[in-house]
Amino acid sequence: MEFTPPFPPQLDPNYSGNNTGIEAYSEEILNQMTTSERTRLAVKLYKKREIEIHDAIKISGLSAEIFASVLRGMNLEVRQMNVLVCGGAGFIGSNFVRHMVTKYPHYKIVNVDKLTYAGNIDNLIDIENRPNYIFYQGDIVDQKFIDEIIVKEKIDSIVNFAAETHVDRSIHIGSREFVMTNTVGVQTLLDATRRHNLFKFVNISTDEVYGSLELGEQRMFTEETAFEPNVPYAAAKAGGDMLCRAYYNTFGVPVIVSHCSNNYGPYQFPEKLIPYLITKALNREQFPIYGDGRYVRDWLFVLDHVKAIDLMLHKGIPGEVYNIGGNNEKSNLEIAKLILQYFGLPESMIKFVPDRPGHDRRYAIDATKIMNELGWYPEHRFEEAIPKTIEWYLHNPEWIAKIKQRNADINEHIK
Ligand code: NAD
């Protein structure tokens, strides 16, 4: 049936303020309207910039996913968001938080991080006083805490980096924490996204869930590749990713999952290969390399990953999966030689050590989908970004020293 004026409906008679946003429309008034009336009202107020996405979804009474598709259909972009970034004090998370806080000064960026051994609040010292940035220490597994933050900060989207991320620890120290954060934590955030009808949830995952490729094999990981995780870290990440798929299919939770290859760049915890070897070079210590060193990873500069996440948050389609990679395969041995070369050190400093169990031989990502559908491409060439990364660590000795003071045992299992 045609919708007839008056439109918009009368304001709440008990409302005495000037605000024409959601405060002007009581639940009672909204409940008397049809879905189509509510949607048109929400879109109209949104277009007139009287409300932002959070309130527009509420007024429409639609699920966030359907309202987002209405906006897309009308070519309307999201202008403002209150984004909950989980795990924003880690390596990729802190690079993402800095990007969002500076690129979108009108957004509110709320960083929730448990500050495990890998979390480092020093990573964000330069932006911690920005008016659009807030930090809370807390655990993504804690449902009550997450609910409180979402309500208090009027969150409309979540980007989740929070994870236990070091494969070696999942092998040598135990995998319980991995399952808690990487699987149960994701389930907690999915439930919260559903309960609060949030606009979007981007879950950052890894290419490691796809298992291993052979050296020289033509095949690459696509979004259709079946999960075959070989180590507890990857299995726990896959658990979270599977729940994302199930929550989208069962409840329509507007979740996007991304699988990215190995990142490198500033602020990476020095247990990971590149900063680990840089700190070894700085101390003129031997470079321990697992097995024959012919373990191949695809390497992507962290800010290229950050750009992809920004695109997925703004333009990604709920329910979709995106692979992200640099088309830049290098073996661990090649990486070690590059770093030695930078420091003018001899290759004899490489010391092959017994391999780790379940060591995947090779990962390679096909990123065609995100390139074609969201217009993403990597801007940083490895040959230029690697020396810049090394220089960042050279210029930040206090950052390294503080981490080492707190963590005496970095990679102590590599013998
Ligand atoms: P990281 O280890 O540097 O940071 C993880 C952060 O999560 C830390 O700040 C930690 O304190 C926080 N955290 C851990 N458990 C938490 C919990 N229960 N609640 C709240 N915060 C918690 O990791 P990273 O390298 O920045 O990776 C971020 C994400 O990207 C991870 O999900 C990882 O699987 C994924 N990823 C990483 C890479 C890579 O090369 N580093 C590649 C692809 C995908």
Image: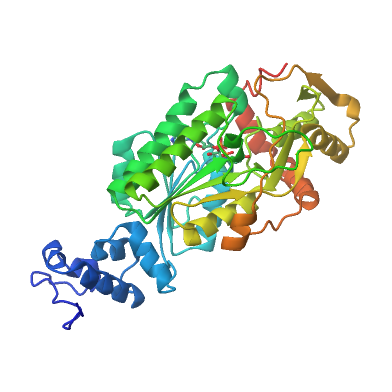
Name the quadrant containing residue 181. top left
Residue extending furthest toward the left: 14
Q: Residue 411 location, x and y as percent?
A: 66, 23
The colour mode here is rainbow
Name the quadrant containing residue 77. bottom left
Instruction: Residue 123: tell me if it is visible.
Output: yes
Q: Quick check: 412 left or right of 384?
A: left
Q: Quick check: 109 left or right of 165?
A: left
Q: Determine the residue positioned at 33% across, 78% down.
A: 48
Q: Determine the residue positioned at 31% across, 73% down.
A: 43
Q: Residue 177 location, x and y as percent?
A: 47, 25
Q: Quadrant of the C terminus?
A: top right
Front residue of 94/166: it is 166
Front residue of 12/377: it is 377
Q: Determine the residue positioned at 70% across, 49% down.
A: 326
Q: Determine the residue positioned at 20% across, 66% down.
A: 23
Residue extending furthest toward the bottom: 5
Instruction: Residue 117: tell me if it is visible.
Output: no
